[in-house]
Every structure is written in structure tokens, then in C-alpha cells.
Image (spheres, rainbow, N blue to C red):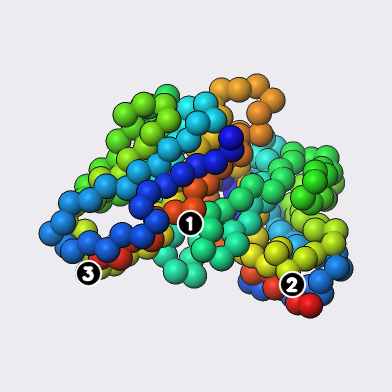
Amino acid sequence: DAKTTQPPSMDCAEGRAANLPCNHSTISGNEYVYWYRQIHSQGPQYIIHGLKNNETNEMASLIITEDRKSSTLILPHATLRDTAVYYCIVRVLLLSGKLIFGQGTELSVKP
Amino acid sequence: DTEVTQTPKHLVMGMTNKKSLKCEQHMGHRAMYWYKQKAKKPPELMFVYSYEKLSINESVPSRFSPECPNSSLLNLHLHALQPEDSALYLCASSQVNRPKSSYEQYFGPGTRLTVT
């Protein structure tokens, strides 16, 4: 699975959009980009995933560049409850694929 | 029901003890996982079960022994652990071989293990 690079930490004001970048320059054509987050003392939570098109769900939007070498997770209106470590993971959709977590970005949403 | 449950929430054990961690899901998932997470570090995969068979062992020491007695349950048996094995142990589950599935993993809250 391809390696990802994320900034170690970011701050965001409550109510503003949080834009979390991820570089995955060695991504292969059959690898998807997944985002998970882990709120303190909880298990990781799936947010969204995509292959090459932009994706949106009730939690977030995922923007993948045309060359697929980077992506951005967007939380449109961050709340204090969005404070967490956000992990960007690239993986092939195997029948029972393992997740390789990088160091992630610690997002602090401030009032 | 999209919940993965883990028991116990906390466990303190001595290096000579034998204990077990339990994980349960009722989402019909046929893949189940054990991860280990040290403080301030990302989760690291330990084991993967697919259709109740061990499919991946990430070179985990034999003092950790996984077991999948049925499609809903996953155990991790612990014996002769070391203090450095103290960590949060996370269980997860996901779909397998389901076209158009996103194969996202659902995680439990974890068991915080302390080895004294």
C-alpha cells in the first residue's frame, strides 16, 4: 500500500471549514483513498473514501487531484466534536484488506 | 446495528497471568481484525480473520493467540505478556467479497491493557 504524508497538526475555528491535506504521490491506479478519524479514547471511525472522483457524504467531502497524487478532506462546518486525529490511508480494495495507518493529522477545533 | 463491542474496557494483568479479550459484531461481517495502539501512535494491525480463518498474522509474538469461534466473535488470548505490551487493543470488522461495498472497517472502543 502507498505511503501517505499528512501535516502533524492543524487548528480550525469552530463553524469554519477544515481542510485536511494528504499527499500520496506513489499511489497506484487501483488504490483508493480512505479517511478515518479517531476521537480521543475511542476507536477509529470511517469518514469517506474515493478512487478518482470527488466524493461527498453527510460527514465530509473528499477532493482528489486529477493526477491522484494528493487529496483534501473537507469538514464544511467544523464543530468542537470534530477535534480528533485524522488518518489518510491508501489501499487496494482487497477481499479482506488491512489498513496501514500513518501518523495522521491532529485537528483541534477551537471556539 | 453498526456496533462493535469489546470487553473488558480495561484490564490489568501480571506477566504470569492468562487473560482474554473479546470482540463481537452482529453486522454480518466476515472479516475481523485486531489492532494494537500504543499511546500517541497510530493503530498497528496484528491479525486478520476472513470467513473465520486466520488470513494475516503481522509477525505477532506467540504470547498473543487469536481465535475466531464463529462469524460474530473474535477473541485474543493473552499469556506471559511483557510490560511493553501495555496498549489499547482495538477490534474491527468489515464486509468481505461484497461487490460495490466500500469495505470500511468498523472499530470497537478498544480494551486498554496494562501489564504489570
- Circle 3: is it few (<14), some (14-19), or many (20+) Cα within 10 Å? some
Q: Whole-Å distance between the Cαs marked 1 and 3? A: 22 Å
Kindly identify the residue that appears in the image at 50 percent across and 42 percent down. B4
Q: Is residue A13 above or below residue B15?
A: below
Of B114 and A66, nearer the camera is: B114
> Which of pointers 2 and 1 indicates the residue nearer the eye?
2
Pointers 2 and 1 in contact (CB under 8 A)?
Answer: no
Numbered circle sitting on residue A100: none
Kindly identify the residue that appears in the image at 42 percent across and 65 percent down. B38
Kindly identify the residue that appears in the image at 68 percent across and 67 percent down. A83
Q: Is residue A94 left or right of residue A69?
A: left
Expressed as whole percent of the image width and height from the top left, the position of residue A40 reads 56, 65
Of A26 and A84, nearer the camera is: A84
Numbered circle sitting on residue B43: 1
Q: Whole-Å distance between the Cαs marked 2 and 1? A: 23 Å
Q: Which residue is mark 2?
A: A109
